[in-house]
Image: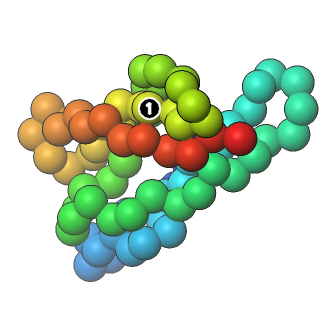
Amino acid sequence: MLAGPENDPEDGKVDDGDYAVYWWDGNGPVKNLGALEPFGKKVKPEALVPLEHTDHKLRVLLFFDGPEEGEPRPVKIDQP
């Protein structure tokens, strides 16, 4: 799961830790996998698509609000 602020920052600056990724297996508690680094001014993560899970790493495709066509990019995240 991807979570972040409800409203855009007034100056458009996305700070470290504004967005985070969470893991939920459908049964147990939700686990915070960590904050995402900023990807640039007015570049806000909006959607996450899981791609693969190997060796305690989760590879996801992030889509963004701001860049043209969502500028998707793969990201690796530690997974519990």
Q: Nearer the viewer, residue 71 or 74?
A: 74
* Residue position for label 1: 59
Quarter holding residue 79: top right
Q: Is residue 27 left or right of residue 55?
A: right
Side (left or right) of 52 relative to 26? left
Relative to 60, say whether 12 is above or below.
below
Q: Quadrant of residue 14?
A: bottom left
Q: Is residue 6 above or below residue 67?
A: below
- Residue occupying image coordinates x 31% and y 35%: 74
Residue 79, visible in the rendered structure: yes
Relative to the observer, which residue lies in front, 6 or 60? 60
Q: Nearer the viewer, residue 36 or 65?
A: 36
Q: Residue 39, how many percent across, how many down?
A: 27, 60
**SS category of the residue bearing label 1:** strand
Residue lying at the far left of the rendered structure? 68
Query: Residue reaching furthest front?
Result: 55
Report crowding for label 1: few under 14, some 14 to 19, many 20 or more residues within 10 A (C-alpha): some
Residue 46 picture quarter: top left
Q: What amino acid type is highlighted by mark number 1?
A: Arg
Colouring convention used in this rendered image of the protein: rainbow
Q: Nearer the viewer, residue 41 or 56?
A: 56
Rendered residue at 27%/45% (across/down): 65
Q: Residue at x 44, y 32 (%)?
A: 59
List x then y, in percent, for residue 40: 22, 65
Task: Farthest residue to the right: give it.
Answer: 28
Q: Could you tell me which quadrant the N terminus lies in? A: top right
Q: Quadrant of the C terminus?
A: top right
Q: What's the residue at 80%, 22% (across, down)?
A: 26
Q: Is residue 31 above or below residue 38?
A: above
Whether residue 5 is visible: no
